[in-house]
Image (cartoon, rainbow, N blue to C red):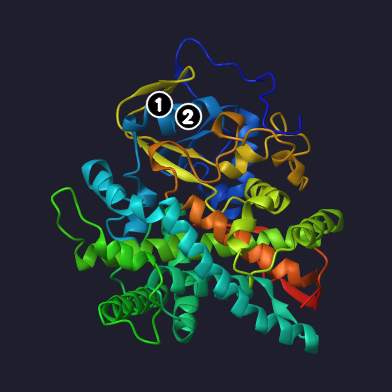
């Protein structure tokens, strides 16, 4: 199979309802150590050994890894009201984002979603896309200097800084390059501590003055300080330091609740921090993987260059935004990248009432985890699942969805609200840089993925760039 066609299920649903199978584990901590050592490999092995539902024990906590798309649809879509996001992991994320689209439920979530949804209207996305084109075009100057001097760049750092520059201009209408170091240093500390507290069975109280706790507090304070500054600046008249173009913060400030009330300062801060956390880091990761995969696949890279030359894509031209739909192979590269390396590689839900899921009993209070990374690489569902093959997403076929085993942006009511924004940003960055430069991996190999809050490379990715055209 080339796409996401379901093969015969080697693990038919059990009948009558019973407890799901479990891989071997320790009698005391269960599977906690195996998960902490290698979360990606452990979950893949558990799904392969146990079938569509695997029961996992992390100390006293019971989790169920659900890896069949039809059952995932039951959890995320059909019976979403019985599988809530009020989980151990969301409570950790709330330490950074507060009550936000990533963590809230029920009425609070609906009000937030309604307030934010108009921001991602097609007309606003086009305006934001033009802003992205300008930012990326400006960033090409740094790659020009590196190409001329033969300097080595770190792809991870380059994509992080570029996606942050885009976030600054699109979120705040401001040039945040002078604040990039503060955010660049703070976000990894926050994400690492959040995942550590999520994946460990027991955690010491955050108020204890341990070095990592102090670093977390300093990093969170740095993020809040940056966000507070730009909110205050955004209330000032537009000057040369801030663009008059459409930006997300301006749209948020105009948003109104059902009663006509504006968002509070706390709500504004939580939304902005959420967009920084969920947008900047995830897009940077996806772009890093995309450039690295193309560098390792010369034929695919040639397809991209041919398409860019045929369309004559140029971020400096006024019609560049209208050219984006013609970049079908660039889009396929991004979709295939997200299949292999979905930035949000795992999601958790809490079981409200005892349920029968595919013949397996899920007790109330237990948790469900679903992993796009696991499902996207299932051998019975994908032809050569470990191979980078963008053609899976071309040839005029309809887009792959959850029913096909593809859900890099989640599914159901909590599908990522910014997915079209993120895909447009990634497409613009990839197209702009590859239209002008060739990228070579200096170590000639892909880095290993590191499964944390997001899926990122475990090491730096040194590259050299050379000019294609000016």
Q: Residue 78 is drawn in which quadrant?
A: top left
Q: Position of residue 63 (x, y in %)?
A: 45, 37
Left or right position of 399 against 361: right
Q: Position of residue 388 (x, y in %)?
A: 76, 48
Label 1 crowd bin: few (<14), some (14–19), many (20+), radius 10 Å: some
Q: Residue 190 is drawn in which quadrant?
A: bottom left
Q: Position of residue 365 (x, y in %)?
A: 32, 34
Q: Which residue is most to the front?
A: 318
Q: Which residue is most to the right?
A: 299
Contact between marks 2 and 1 (CB within 8 A): the answer is yes
Residue 78: assigned label:
1
**Residue plotted at (78% across, 70% down):** 439
Q: Which residue is most to the top?
A: 16
Give the position of the N terminus as an image quadrant. Answer: top right
Q: Position of residue 198 (x, y in %)?
A: 42, 54
Nearest the viewer among 93 and 182 is 182
Where disc 1 sits, the SS reads helix
The answer to whether residue 239 is above or below residue 319 is below
Give how far apart the Cα atoms at labels 2 and 1 are. Answer: 6 Å
**Residue plotted at (62% across, 66% down):** 429
- The answer, for residue 205, to whether it is visible in the render is no
Left or right position of 251 against 6: left
Nearest the viewer among 274 and 306 is 306
Give the position of the C terminus as an image quadrant. Answer: bottom right
Label 2 crowd bin: few (<14), some (14–19), many (20+), radius 10 Å: some
Disc nearer the start of the sequence (2/1): 2
**Residue plotted at (56% across, 74% down):** 134
The answer to whether residue 154 is above or below residue 86 is below
Residue ID for mark 2 = 73
Where disc 2 sits, the SS reads helix
């Amino acid at each position: 199979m080339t796409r996401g066609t379901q093969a015969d299920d080697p693990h038919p649903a059990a009948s009558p309802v019973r407890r799901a199978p479990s891989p071997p584990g320790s009698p005391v901590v269960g599977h906690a150590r195996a998960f902490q050592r290698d979360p990606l490999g452990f979950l893949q092995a558990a799904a392969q050994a146990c079938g569509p539902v695997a029961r996992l024990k992390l100390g006293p906590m019971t989790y169920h890894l659900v890896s069949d798309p039809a059952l995932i649809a039951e959890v995320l879509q059909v019976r979403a009201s019985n599988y809530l996001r009020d989980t151990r992991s969301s409570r950790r994320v709330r330490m950074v984002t507060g009550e936000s689209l990533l963590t809230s439920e029920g009425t609070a979530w609906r009000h937030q979603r309604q307030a934010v949804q108009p921001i991602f209207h097609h007309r606003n996305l086009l305006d934001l896309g033009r802003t992205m084109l300008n930012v990326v075009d400006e960033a090409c100057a740094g790659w020009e200097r590196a190409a001329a001097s033969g300097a080595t760049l770190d792809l991870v750092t380059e994509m992080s800084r570029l996606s942050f520059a885009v976030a600054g201009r699109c979120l705040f209408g401001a040039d945040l390059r002078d604040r990039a170091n503060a955010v660049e240093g703070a976000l990894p500390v926050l994400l690492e501590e959040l995942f550590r507290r999520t994946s460990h069975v027991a955690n010491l109280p955050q108020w204890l003055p341990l070095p990592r706790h102090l670093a977390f507090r300093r990093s969170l304070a740095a993020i809040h300080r940056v966000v507070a500054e730009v909110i205050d600046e955004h209330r000032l008249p537009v000057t040369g330091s801030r663009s008059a173009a459409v930006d997300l913060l301006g749209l948020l400030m105009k948003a109104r609740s059902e009663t006509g009330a504006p968002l509070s300062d706390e709500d504004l801060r939580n939304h902005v921090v959420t967009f920084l956390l969920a947008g900047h880091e995830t897009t940077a990761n996806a772009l890093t993987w995309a450039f690295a995969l193309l560098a390792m696949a010369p034929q695919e890279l040639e397809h991209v260059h041919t398409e860019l030359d045929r369309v004559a894509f140029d971020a400096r031209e006024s019609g560049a935004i209208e050219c984006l739909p013609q970049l079908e192979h660039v889009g396929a590269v991004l979709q295939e990248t997200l299949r292999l390396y979905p930035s949000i590689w795992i999601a958790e839900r809490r079981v409200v009432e005892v349920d029968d899921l595919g013949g397996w009993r899920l007790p109330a209070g237990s948790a469900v985890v679903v992993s796009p990374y696991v499902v996207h690489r299932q051998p019975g569902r994908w032809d050569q699942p470990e191979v980078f093959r963008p053609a899976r997403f071309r040839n005029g076929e309809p887009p792959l969805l959850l029913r096909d085993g593809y859900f890099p942006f989640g599914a159901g009511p909590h599908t990522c609200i910014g997915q079209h924004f993120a895909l447009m940003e990634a497409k613009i960055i990839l197209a702009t840089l590859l239209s002008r430069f060739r990228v070579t991996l200096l170590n000639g190999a892909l880095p290993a993925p590191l499964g944390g809050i997001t899926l990122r490379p475990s090491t730096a990715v040194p590259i050299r760039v050379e000019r294609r055209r000016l």
